[in-house]
Every structure is written in structure tokens, then in C-alpha cells.
Image (spheres, rainbow, N blue to C red):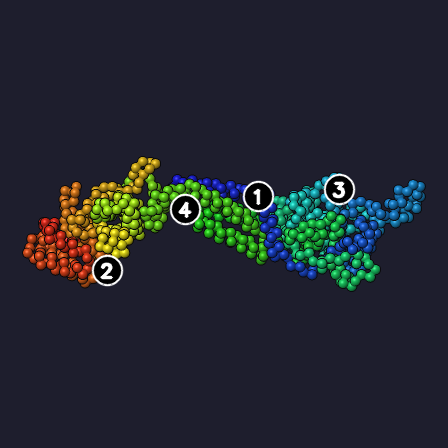
Amino acid sequence: MTRAQLVGVLIGLAIVAALTVLRANDPQLLRFAREITFDEYQRLAPRPFENLPVRVVDIDEASLREFGQWPWPRDRLAALVNRLSEMGAAVIAFDILFAEPDRLSPRTVVRDVMGIDPALLERLPDNDEIFAGAIADKPVVLGFGLSTEGNYRPPVKAGFAFTGESPFDAPPRLTAATPLRPQLEANATGIGHISLNPGSPTAVVRAIPLLLSDGEQLYPNLALEALRVAQGASTYLLAGATDVPDTITRIKIGDFAVPVTATGELWLYVSEDRAERYVSAGQVLSAAAPQEVSAAVEGSIVFVGTSAAGLLDIRTTALGHNVPGVSLHAQAVEQILSGRFLSRPDWANGLEILSIAVAGSLLVVLTTFVSPGVALACGLLITGLALAASWVAFLHLGLLLDPLAPILAASITHFAATAYRFLVTDRERRVVRRAFGQYLSPSLLYRIEHTQNALRLGGDDRELTIMFVDVRNFTEISERLAPTEVVGFLNTLLDALSRHVIENEGTLDKFIGDSIMAFWNAPVDVADHPRKAVRAALAMRETLARLNDKDAFGFGAGQKVAIGIGIHTGLACVGNMGAETHFNYSAVGDPVNVAARIESACKEVGFDILVSETTAKLAGGCAVLEAGALGLKGKSMRTRLFAIVGDERLAASGEFTELQNIHWRLIEALRTRSTESRRALGAAKLTASALAPGLSDFYRRISRRGDHFVNEPTAKDAVAE
């Protein structure tokens, strides 16, 4: 791991830690995004509407047109209660506040008239008394609202039992309530609060509190109380978390158990707002109510409320629909009856926080040590899995698991890690590409990019195979050409030849005028590098022949360009050499000099590819012929050279095997100065002419270089195939 990579990992993990802590604190923005996600799930798969025994008696616009504006006198509400009771309603729950005396009551109207006999006043009807008398002994539930004034607490008409720790501090706090008229309070069978989302900053109702608490007493909501009264139950049973105070996990009402949040809220799983849920209050009060109205009310839990636009009791659901507030009480009961609940389990937060930490750390590691592309693919896979798992959990288990926070955190982490890698970690690799992109094969370049300290100043001793290539008679060629033509000639030739170095995993060191210097096995290890260098030389020979045949240099027929190639393998020093701010990657040492001298010897030997004995041994299998031991400039001892005739296929041919045997006899005759050398040389020339045209000149010059073989052992056993 490089220092840049280490710093990148530390920065990435710090970002992951910050995002994890941010999610643990759960700011309002994240909660809002999470709620929007859950809303979308409900829009994709809303709760199916079922014809359950729950109805809303709606004081709608038609009812107001027929019976007058709101508020109605309470004797009319008494008539409504009586009609619903006659139709067989299981319970009648009012989503209406009765905090003030009925101002339309005759007694109230006449009371303000001066000089009225008090006895006469008492004989006048009072609508509150009429309404109180109507609800007495009937299953009627009245509602109360939250207030910021006074200290009124409504009576609770049911008992509470709980398991586990005390739940009294779990629900939202009730500080004061809107008062009920005393006679209504006394005669109601049940009393529940009608608040849908107290204290919520959003208009969308996603969860409703089933309970409120003042610290000493619990207060059920209207829907819960209506369900209790409909069953004739007397007690709520609350289940809390073991050893966790102020937590509620479930509320049991009669035969129904309702999973709730820790504060006693019910996640609303809403259905479409269907007309079948509603019954017009005007139809109930009409003298001849339609039969379908009586059938809808019979045996149903009835909620009385209003949808009239001017009465401002319109709420927004998770589906994005604006509905009367009373319908949400009805939907809460429908949800309990159907048993289709949504829940956000206690472990959901922990799972989401853990997923941010794990996924973020994984992306940091992949981005830093593998590649941003792989990290991106992994991130997209994580995104897909998170979305799929969250959706399946919602659809089949009713679980609300947030995929958005882990996805958002993973995206931020990947962007930050990728940006750091591009700006810092990959800077060295971009330098490598600029320095080596034109001189190395893509596979070698990739290996250098992933090698630590690849471009540090200094050198290493490595076994290299070094090649020098030189153009024959370049001075004569350049004299016949204009300077721009010389440049064009060199570009054409050197470009064609240098490609074979790169294709065979070599490194182009430099171009020296009309010469090429290249080496193998640096800057990274190259397996079987002597053989690859020889293959590159043979490919150069073939490429030059094609260029000459099609007159690529424009010299005309009969004008051929020739080259000499010298190859040697030995221990050299290779690395970045120069100044800290400007350096070249090159090789120095005796093997470099030897390779250059071998290339020069091609002129004397009369052959285009010569290699040292070391290279010939390591590149075994090629078609090789001994070229004698020459005294190279700067070397105290003669160096044994070998001519590369062809590749492994030629070496395996019968013709070359025959030539090789003749060649060994020729060398032995030259070494011993035997007269047999003349006959062997003739046989060698005859056989060689059919194999490679370049061998003819090679054998013509051997007769003049007999002393190159004198006192030298034969190479028959020196070069192993």
C-alpha cells in the first residue's frame, strides 16, 4: 500500500464514519426523505379497499344544502344518532368537537332577551340536553381535541393494563384538552382524541397516535375507542419492550392486536378514497332513507364527520390524496380489521446505520485498491439489492426499511473516493502513462501502474535482454535525401520496427539517430525475455522485407534498406536516471555495451541478427548457427556469437537440421584448419540458399574468418534447444 493509498483509505473511512454518525443522529432532512420513500411504496402498492363494516356518515355539501349551514343544531345531531341507532350501527363515533354550548338552542337564544320569566325559560328546550339524552344508553363515542389553555382532562371510560415496563411516558404528551359539555361527557359510552398528527411539521398524515398521556393517565384516540366500544371491551392491554421503559410495542383491543411504534403510533396503510366508504348525512336524515343506506350502516362502525370544503377538515394521505380527516379514523379501523399493518421495527435504524458503514467501507477499499469502475459496479449492485430488499420487505412483510440513506451515503463515499483517487492516487499512474505509453505494451504498462514506487529515481540490478538495431549505410542514404525526406524515412522505418518490441513485452529505451535501443525484463518481470527479444528481431526482419518489397521508402526498385540487430542477456542497472524533476528510464552497464558491439559485428559477420552465447542458450529452440568468437571493442576476451536464422518451426524442419549438421562439420574443420572445410563450406552454401537468402553472404565471409573459430570449442553442446 502506497502512502497515497493509505491516506485515501483514511479519508474515505473518515467520510464513512461521518455519514454513519449523521444517519445515527437522523436529522429532519433524512427523515423527510425516508418518509417520501415510504409514500412512494404506498402509491405503488396501496392497501386494497375491502368492503369492511366501517362507514363515514359525511356531512357533505349536499347535506348542508338540504339542512342548512354548519354548525347544525344539536337536536339535529340527536336525530342523526337516533336514525343511525335504528339502522343498527354498531358504534357511532363523532369526529366533531362539542366544547361550547349549542348557540342555536332555543333556551340559549331566548336567555338574552330582557324580562323573560325564568320559569318559562326552563320550559324551553335545550339542544345539548336533547343530544345528551339521545346518546345515553347508545354506543356513542365523542371526540376531544388538544388545547394549549387550561388544564381540562377528559374522563377515560376504559381501563388500561400493561406488561413490561411502565408505558405512561411513551405516547405524545397531553397538556390540556378541549372540554366536553358535562352532560355529553357523562352520557357518552367512550371518549377519544381526534388529533391525527399532533406536533408534526408536515401536512401529510403518515402515522396517528393511538394514545396520548399526561404522565399519569393514558387517553385513547377516536378510532381505538370506537373499536373498543363496538366489541364491548372494557380494557386496553399494552405490551412493552422487555427491560426498556417508556416503550409500547403492541396494543390489544378485544380480539384485535395492533403493532405500534415505540410511542404508540399506528403507521397508516391507506387505500384509495372510495365512494363506498361514505354515506351522506342528508340521506340518513331524510324521511325515506334509501335501502342501501340502511344496509351500509347496519352492523358498521360509523364515524360522523364532514367533508365540506369550508369546514377545513381536509388532510393529505401518503397517496397524495386530499381526504376528510374523519376518513383517516375510518381507515385506521379498516386497517386493524383487515390485519394489514405497516411497521418499522426497532432494529431498522441499526441495520441502516450498519449498512452505511459496511457498504461505504467496501466502496472505499474497492475504489482505492481495485478500480473506480469495479467500485461503481459494486455500488450499483448494492443500490439494486437495497431497493429490492426494501420493496420486498414492504410488499410481503409490511416492514418499512429505508434504502435511500445507505444508497445516498454509498454514492457520496464513492464520489469522494473516486475524486481522491483521480486527483492524488492516480497521479503517479498518469505520469507513468505519459512516460511509458509510447514505449511499452498495454499489459506491461498496466503492471507498472500497479507496481509500488515504479518511478522512483535510481536503479536496480536486473537481468536484462538488450537489443540494438541499426540501419546499414545510413550515411549514404541520408546524403541522397533532403532533410525532411530523411525524417520521413526514419519515421516510417523506426515506427514499423519498434512496434514489435512493444508487441513482445519489451521496453523501448531510446532512438539514437537511425538506431533503436530496447530491453526486456524491466521495469517489471517478463517471463522468457530472451526468447521474446529474438521473436521481436525475427518480426523486424519480416517487416523490413515487406517494406522493401512494396518500396515503402520510395527508393525505387533494387534499392533495399538493411538493418543489423545485436542482442545480449546479462546483469545491468535499470531505472530512472537524471534529475528529480527530469529523468529518463534507461539501462546502463557492460551488457548494454556488449549488445551494441554485437550489433556492430553484424557487418563483419555478414548477417542481420546476432546474439550472444548467453542469449542463444536462454532462447533455446530457435534456428541458431554459431558465427564464431569475435573480439569486441572494449572486451579483453573474444565473445562467441550466434546467428538467428529463424524461429522454432524452422528449427524443427529437416532442411535446417541438415544445414546445422553441415555447419558443425564446417566449424570443426575451421577450428582444426582441416582441408575438409572447403567441401563443408560448399555443402553449407548449397543447403543454405534454399533456407534464407541472407545466409549466402554469411557463408561467403566464414571462409575469411577462419581464425574466429580457431582454439574455440565447438558450440554443438553449448546451445541447448
| Pointer 3 or 4: first along the chain | 3
Q: Amino acid at mark 1?
A: Asp
- The quadrant in which the C terminus is found is bottom left
| Pointer 2 or 4: first along the chain | 4
**Residue 289, located in which quarter of the rendered image?**
bottom right
Q: What SS does tag 2 mark?
A: helix
Mark 1 sits on what residue?
26
Using a 10 Å C-alpha cutoff, classify the residue at mark 3 as few (fewer than 14 neighbours), some (14 to 19) or many (20 or more): some
User: Which residue: 31% across, 52% down?
Assistant: 503
Q: Nearer the observer, disc 3 or disc 4?
A: 4
Q: CA distance from mark 2 to mark 1?
A: 72 Å
Q: What SS does tag 3 mark?
A: loop
At which x and y percent is residue 352? 54, 48
| Pointer 3 or 1: first along the chain | 1
At which x and y percent is residue 58? 75, 55
Q: CA distance from mark 1 to mark 4?
A: 31 Å
Left or right, 484 with reference to 168: left
At which x and y percent is residue 414? 48, 46
Q: CA distance from mark 3 to mark 4?
A: 66 Å
Using a 10 Å C-alpha cutoff, classify the residue at mark 2 as few (fewer than 14 neighbours), some (14 to 19) or many (20 or more): few
Mark 4 sits on what residue?
369
Q: Which mark is residue 152?
A: 3
Q: Which mark is residue 649?
A: 2
Q: Nearer the viewer, residue 50 or 240?
A: 50
User: Which residue: 58% across, 57% down?
Assistant: 395
Task: Kindly indicate whether the residue at mark 4 contacts the one at mark 3 (C-beta within 8 angstroms).
Answer: no
Q: Is residue 5 visible?
A: no
Using a 10 Å C-alpha cutoff, classify the residue at mark 4 as few (fewer than 14 neighbours), some (14 to 19) or many (20 or more): some
